[in-house]
Image (spheres, coloured by chain):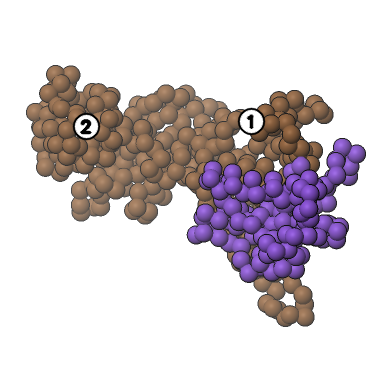
Chain colours: A brown, B purple
Amino acid sequence: MDETVAEYIRRTVLKIPRDEIKTMLQKWGFLSETQLQTINFHQMKDNISQDVVQCCEENSASIKQAAVLDIIYNHSYPNKRMWSVYQMNKTEEETDFFDLTDFRKKFKRHLRSALKNVTINFREYENNAIWIRIAWGTPYTKPNQYKTSYVVYHSQTPHAFISPSVLKSNLPLLCQALVVASNYQDIHEMELRSHSLNSLEDMVFKRYSQNFETYCPRPLQESTVAQESAAGLRIVQENINEKERIQRVNRDTFGDGPQPKLEFAEYKLETMFTSDPKLEVLDKKEPFRCMVKFHSPHLLESLKSLAPAGMADAPLSPLLTCIPHKARNYFKIREKKGFFPGSFVSP
Amino acid sequence: HIATSLPLPSERDHLRPRIDMIVFMIDIKSKYSLKNVEDSLAHVDARFFLGKVCFLVTGVGRVNCCSVDMNAVWKLGENYCSPVLFCELELEGTRVATAQRLLRMLQICAGHVPGVSALYFSTLM
């Protein structure tokens, strides 16, 4: 077995948390049950990985199998990578029947015709999601297995989620191959990026709980009961009407269920600076460029809790609340004439 | 009665008993809470400032998160002739002790302690 393959398998195993190693190896299916029995999964991870490599030697693992293990790892822990969302479109309305073998062949052919040194692997998962792993090389060097790009293509939709490698120059080629293989005409990047792949999918496929207009004028009784139970009935909330209004507006805006997980929202302002003309600041009639970025471990949940915590007025600015509906977290705000001109140019 | 700011909503005026003491709570982590208190003070009748108002600064256990200017708080106490108390709500010990203190002050403000008037609170400053 190749030394590089052995080292790659060893490092991949080291990334996996110790309690999960056995299950992941079983999912991989490359080592037999008897071989797995011989490995002690309670020793130090260093030793576990050595044992695994030993077993792989016995089975003569190639880079192909090692790549599959990497896919399984990334499928279980997708949040370690940053994902961008891409949408493809075509003009004809006829929907071709999706053929996986045809897709794989075309994808490989397109990539290999431009760049011979690539490792490409596919794995199908539920919900028609196809995971593609690509390790990039150059015309003169073998593919670098540590600098991989991942694509999750949902074959029944025009959407693909791409986690590019650090070698950004390969991204256009990757996009092209995807378009050609899936019989679309072009591809563009949506202004949506996050570490949480599941949340991106939820937002794009509208799977999160959305708010619906409620025509019930009286607030639901449950909210008042919850407040009264706290610390006895002798505490009187003077602003209870306002608190209930905030809860109602918040529920209308965000819905009741958990929000998709985003880490940031970025707003690029290209608006004119308005100030007292006597100050003579920026007498050039140019837009004032400024960027506002919101960071959070869970941005939408923290926005949802702003008004109840008393830190913001309810309802929140539509610039913030439109994020899940518009499925974007990059915005360009220009002068007047409505808010977001919906630019699809990546910043 | 707990309120987020003053003035109190007028629709509940008929439900409210006599007010004996007002405690303004300032969260040391929030500049907004200080501003809110300053704005609300303008709505308080001058007679309350004869010992029936007190400032309670909370969150003092987390000094590294302090974003309120302490000089401003002291000045507030001086300008309105009212004592400033400190407390950390997350620690049960100080929480209980502060509650007992406030309760004692309330008893005096309500006139339940013979021989002691709320005017004596100026000595706490």
Neighbour class for label 1 at 10 Å: few (<14), some, many (≥20)?
Answer: few
The amino acid on which the numbered mark 1 sits, given as a three-letter code, is Asp
Q: Quadrant of residue A178?
A: top left
Read off the chain for label 2: A
| Residue A141, horizontal then vertical, whole percent | 20, 52
Task: Say how many tags the image has.
Answer: 2
Considering depth in this image, is A45 or A66 the residue closer to the camera? A45
Report the residue marked by disc 2: A65
- Quadrant for the C terminus of chain B, please: bottom right
- Under circle 2, the secondary element is helix
Instruction: Please tell me which residue is depicted at 20% across the width and 37% down the height of the picture.
Output: A45
| Residue A278, horizontal then vertical, whole percent | 77, 80
Callouts 1 and 2 in the same chain: yes
| Residue A16, horizontal then vertical, whole percent | 28, 36
Q: Is residue A264 visible?
A: no
- Quadrant for the N terminus of chain B, please: top right
Give the vertical position of B65 relative to B13 (above or below): below
Report the residue marked by disc 1: A256
N-terminal-most mark, 1 or 2: 2
Neighbour class for label 2 at 10 Å: few (<14), some, many (≥20)?
Answer: some
